[in-house]
Every structure is written in structure tokens, then in C-alpha cells.
Image (tube, rainbow, N blue to C red):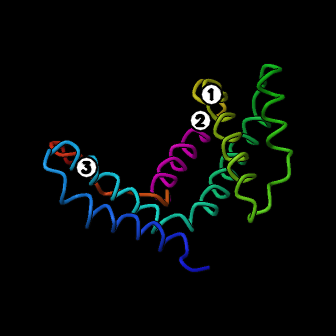
Amino acid sequence: MRPDVSEQLDGLRGILERIVAPELHDPYPADILAGVCATLESLSSGWRRVPAFLQWDAEMTVALLREVLATVELDDALDAQLRVLVFADPPDAANLSALEARHTQARLALAAAMPVIMEAPELRELRTYLAAHLRERADRYPLKSVWRPAGAPKN
């Protein structure tokens, strides 16, 4: 398909940079436009990797939650929430809507399980695994923008 998604996003970014940006004389809207252009660039270069990221992150999170389910006694509501997720078949990798839904479900279940994960002594090793997963998740996230608002501190 031509133009593909990346080409369309790059085209939109080019229009904004070549036609709209020179007409902006106030620093604030110009800075906002720079952020929009950086986001379009990030989307253009990273959108193809989003499905694989969603699938990887959801399945790593499900594996972690499977361990929670197998290790500690949970209240009925959390137990049911984790069982639905853990025993469901992963979606087809080509079905982006299903991948997004599974990813959202996994992240919500992780949030619900966090008090148990953080407090249960028998999950000490799992907390280490979770911290490593969250670091790797940040490193793997496919949509990274390098734009910083004017005056923003540099890390």
C-alpha cells in the first residue's frame, strides 16, 4: 500500500514543519508544534513494533501473575480476575485490537495484584523479576520521542 503508514505520518510531519512552523511567531505554539512533529516522527518509526511489544509485555505480565496465583492465597475477586487472564488463550498476533485488549487486561490485573506482590514475603523473588521486567519494558517501548518542551530540564 502506498503511501504506507510511515510515509503518511512523515508527510504530515513535513507539512507541519515546512508550511505551518514558519508561520508561528509565538514561542509557545511553535514549541507545541515541535512536540507534535516529534511525536509523528516517533509514530512513523515505531508503529510497526507496537504489536510485538504488546504481545511480549502482556505475556511476560501474565507469566508473573501466574506465579502470584500459584504462590499466594488471594481474595476471591482478585483470584477470579487473574484466573480469567492466566487461563485465556493469547490472541492472534495479527489481531491488534485483541492484542491491545489483552495488554490492557494484563496491566489492570497487575495493578490490582500489586499490593499482594509488594507485601507477600513469599513473592520476594517475584518483586525482583517485576522490577527487571519494568526496566526492560521501558527499554523496549517502541514509541520514543526525543522532544523536550522549551525550558524542560534534561535528565
| Disc 2 crowd, CA 10 A, few/some/many (<14, 14-19, 20+) | few
Quadrant assignment, res 104: top right
Horizontal and vertical percent for residue 32? 27, 46
Vertical placement of residue 70 versus 50, above or below? above
The magenta region covers: 125-140
Q: Which residue is mark 2?
A: 124
Residue at the image point whose x is 80% and y is 56% from the top: 91
In reply to whether residue 128 is colored magenta, the answer given is yes
Nearer the observer, 13 or 130: 13
Vertical placement of residue 108 versus 43, above or below? above
Mark 1 and mark 2: Cα distance apart in space: 6 Å
Nearer the observer, 55 or 62: 55
Which label belongs to residue 148? 3
Q: Which residue is mark 1?
A: 121
Q: Give yes or no for contact between labels 1 and 2 (Cβ–Cβ under 8 Å).
A: yes
In reply to whether residue 22 is colored magenta, the answer given is no
Q: Secondary structure at mark 3?
A: loop
